[in-house]
């Protein structure tokens, strides 16, 4: 789980602070030692840690805090606010040039950071907003780099411009921008070559592209799981090529948080997006305040709501609401609901965004693959059985179990749970009466 290590340590420190009715300056200093240790163990840049601790300590030992009604909570609030500042306070966006101009976004980074996948994810984001995009294959060195970009482009529905691997990246970039201008394409993404480490050849090539093409944004892709190394890479690229911002990849697997907490403070450049999974849809805009809440174990309800609204079709939600009130939903609705949850990232991801759930989930193993067992049982039913589960008799159960590759007891259990859920929904539907519910609907109308 993202930030699990640092989150656990900070929450333990906060628990001690909350348990004290009053706080002394010594209490704050002791807490700051724990916070400092947690940040350093999370691979946060040591200079950043020093500045952060000084800023929090200076505010936390004030008379208003120590003599306040809830001093422990006030110190935690200060930590949260300073963490927001550390990562940039405000969310920064990539602003496109006027519609009669081509916005050129050059993506750079080391091999293995996920650059080629990330550029396709980013292009997909802008395509969803109705912007015309062009992916450009400028990596002429890595075997299969061009093919990988073409496959990802096809999945995203974004065209890929390529001139093979016998032309220079500079010529390819120039030709792509000319092609975009002639065909009224608004955004050109340049997928440049990476290396295993920062070297002169890579930097010279990036500089040459910028000298010959009017690059609007130079965005660096860095692997969040490499911690302090990611910060060092970002500093090198910024000093030698000049970057406008960063996209952090593999943030879903980063239990420490060092890169997320250090990059802005060290480079002065914003984090635009964060890669939260392997799917081409797993790219989230980076909100410093929300990220600070996740790191501090306070959840991230805003992102959860946005994911739900993006995943849940409004018309289907209204239909589901009516079925919910009448308890008339069937296994087809069950499958629709499961698909919506998968779009939102799965149960584990959803629960981790709820305030206070981080610690409770720590020792709970959520096997998302187990969720496929009910799905396989339902898919082994005939369309008639899915629409009308009441007709499923013992012989049908045996056939369904055989088709799903499970024991008949699992089929019985699913049918029993489904019937119990329908009864519960019928009762809740009656209590709800005709009242309208809010804009945020979870799957199954809950």
Image (tube, helix red, strand yellow):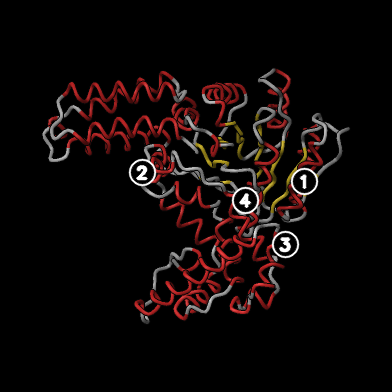
First in sequence: mark 2 vs mark 3: 2
Q: Position of residue 257 (x, y in %)?
A: 47, 31
Q: Which residue is mark 4?
A: 281
Between 349 and 250, the one nearer to me in the picture: 349
Q: Which of the numbered marks, if any, corresponds to residue 149? A: none
Disc 4 element: loop
Disc 1 element: helix
Q: Are marks 4 and 3 in contact (CB under 8 Å)?
A: no
Between 227 and 191, the one nearer to me in the picture: 227
Tell me if mark 4 has few (under 14), some (14-19) or many (20+) residues whose alpha carbon lies within 10 angstroms of its own.
some
Disc 3 element: helix
Between 209 and 47, the one nearer to me in the picture: 47
Q: Which residue is mark 3?
A: 402
- Cα–Cα span, label 4 and label 3: 35 Å
Q: Which residue is mark 1?
A: 178
First in sequence: mark 4 vs mark 3: 4
**Position of 208 relative to 70 (above/below):** above
Looking at the image, residue 252 sits to the left or right of residue 66; the answer is right
First in sequence: mark 4 vs mark 2: 4
Residue at the far right: name it.
166
Q: Are marks 1 and 4 in contact (CB under 8 Å)?
A: no
**Position of 404 relative to 365 (above/below):** below
- Cα–Cα span, label 3 and label 1: 59 Å
First in sequence: mark 1 vs mark 4: 1
Q: Which of the numbered marks, if any, corresponds to residue 298? A: 2
Tell me if mark 3 has few (under 14), some (14-19) or many (20+) residues whose alpha carbon lies within 10 angstroms of its own.
some
Looking at the image, residue 247 sits to the left or right of residue 51; the answer is right
**Position of 83 relative to 348 (above/below):** above
């Amino acid at each position: 789980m993202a930030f699990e290590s640092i989150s656990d340590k900070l929450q333990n420190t906060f628990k001690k602070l909350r348990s004290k009715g009053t706080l002394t300056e010594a209490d704050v200093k002791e807490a700051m030692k724990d916070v400092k240790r947690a940040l350093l163990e999370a691979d946060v840049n040591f200079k950043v840690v020093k500045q952060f601790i000084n800023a929090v300590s200076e505010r936390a030992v004030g008379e208003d805090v120590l003599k306040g009604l809830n001093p422990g909570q006030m110190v935690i609030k200060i930590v949260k606010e300073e963490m927001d500042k550390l990562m940039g306070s405000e969310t920064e966006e990539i602003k496109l040039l006027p519609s009669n101009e081509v916005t050129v976004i050059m993506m750079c980074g080391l091999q293995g950071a996920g650059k080629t996948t990330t550029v396709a994810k980013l292009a997909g984001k802008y395509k969803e907003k109705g912007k015309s995009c062009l992916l450009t294959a400028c990596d002429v060195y890595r075997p299969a780099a061009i093919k990988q970009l073409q496959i990802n482009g096809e999945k995203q529905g974004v065209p890929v411009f390529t001139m093979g691997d016998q032309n220079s990246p500079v010529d390819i970039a120039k030709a792509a921008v000319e092609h975009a201008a002639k065909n009224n394409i608004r955004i050109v993404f340049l997928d440049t070559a990476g290396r295993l480490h920062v070297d002169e050849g890579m930097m010279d090539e990036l500089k040459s592209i910028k000298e010959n093409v009017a690059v609007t944004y130079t965005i660096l892709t860095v692997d969040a799981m490499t911690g302090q190394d990611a910060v060092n890479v970002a500093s090198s690229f910024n000093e030698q090529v000049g970057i406008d911002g960063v996209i952090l990849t593999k943030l879903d697997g980063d239990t420490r948080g060092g890169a997320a907490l250090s990059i802005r403070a060290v480079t002065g450049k914003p984090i635009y997006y964060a890669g939260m999974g392997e799917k081409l849809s797993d790219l989230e805009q980076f909100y410093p305040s929300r990220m600070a809440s996740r790191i501090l174990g306070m959840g991230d309800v805003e992102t959860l709501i946005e994911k739900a609204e993006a995943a849940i079709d409004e018309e289907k939600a209204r239909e589901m609401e009516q079925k919910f009130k009448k308890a008339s939903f069937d296994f087809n609705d069950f499958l629709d609901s499961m698909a919506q949850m998968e779009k939102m990232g799965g149960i584990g991801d959803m629960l981790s965004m709820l305030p206070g759930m981080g610690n409770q989930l720590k020792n709970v193993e959520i096997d998302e693959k187990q969720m496929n067992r009910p799905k396989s049982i339902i898919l082994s039913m005939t369309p008639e059985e899915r629409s009308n589960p009441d007709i499923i008799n013992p012989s049908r159960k045996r056939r369904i179990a055989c088709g799903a590759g499970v024991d008949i007891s699992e089929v019985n259990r699913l049918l029993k749970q489904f019937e119990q859920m329908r009864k519960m929904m019928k009762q809740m539907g009656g209590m709800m009466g005709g009242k309208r519910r809010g804009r945020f609907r979870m799957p199954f109308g809950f």
